[in-house]
Amino acid sequence: MKETIAYIGLGGNLGNPDATCRAATVTLAESSDVVLLRSSALYRTQPVDAPGPDYCNGVLEIRTQLSALSLLELLLQTEQTFGRSRTAWHAPRTLDLDLIAFGDSRIISAQLSLPHPRAHERAFVLIPLCEVNPEVMLGGPDAVSLRPARIWRDQLSAAESNQVIAW
């Protein structure tokens, strides 16, 4: 089976989110289906369109032989292991694992959209993602809008960038 490089956004804002993000990183790295290549620093960010405490966010670069959907299932299982409950859209959470990009795959389905359809708009994704690989292609649903993450990051306003603070 072909190996693919994938990028995972991690975050949480309940309990001790920095400890949870670190523990989730270890859990994923210990999976026989994942090789952790790099991880960003962790950052404190305010919730977007939601109430609750500040988030801890970061990004992981992994190598896997799993399909995109199988990797998504592993991420959802890992969230549950760390007590994630899905009570409401944008509700506070112990752990959130988002598949940001999966090689050069373009997927639009009911279960998964890749690259992540809003990653290019979010400073809390772009800043840590650019630490691990600024060339990851992100953008909207059309292939024309795909650009390297560094381009999207450089388009952030100073106010947006300043809201992503080292943990």
Image (tube, helix red, strand yellow):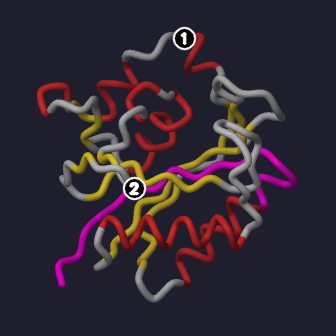
Against 72, residue 100 (above or below) is above
Quadrant of the drawing holding the C terminus: top right
- Let me know if residue 39 is in the magenta part: no
Q: Give the farthest residue toward the bottom.
A: 32
Secondary structure, mark 2, is: strand
Q: Which residues are drawn in magenta?
A: 1-19
Counting from the top left corner in percent of width and height, residue 92 is at 76, 42
Q: Is residue 75 left or right of residue 56?
A: left
- 141 or 31, which is in the foreground? 141
How many marks on residues?
A: 2
User: Which residue is farthest right?
Assistant: 15
Question: Mark 1: which amino acid?
Answer: Ala
**Image: 48 above or below 10:** above
Q: Are marks 1 and 2 in contact (CB under 8 Å)?
A: no
Q: Quadrant of residue 63?
A: bottom left
Nearer the N terminus, badge 1 or badge 2?
2
Hey, what amino acid is under mark 2?
Tyr
Is label 1 in a helix, a strand or a loop? Answer: helix
Mark 1 or 2: the one toward you? 2
Residue beneath the point at 20% across and 48% down: 106
Query: What residue is shown with label 1?
Result: 158
Q: Is residue 74 above or below residue 16?
A: below
Q: Is 166 or 48 nearer to us in this picture?
A: 48
Q: Give the Cα distance between marks 1 and 2.
A: 25 Å
Residue carrying label 2 = 7
Q: Residue at x 49, y 73 (%)?
A: 74
Q: Residue at x 29, y 64 (%)?
A: 5
Could you tell whether 96 is left or right of 65 in the image? Answer: right
Q: Residues within 10 Å of mark 2 (few under 14, many from 20)?
A: many
Residue 12 falls inside the magenta stretch: yes
Res. 124 image quadrant: top right
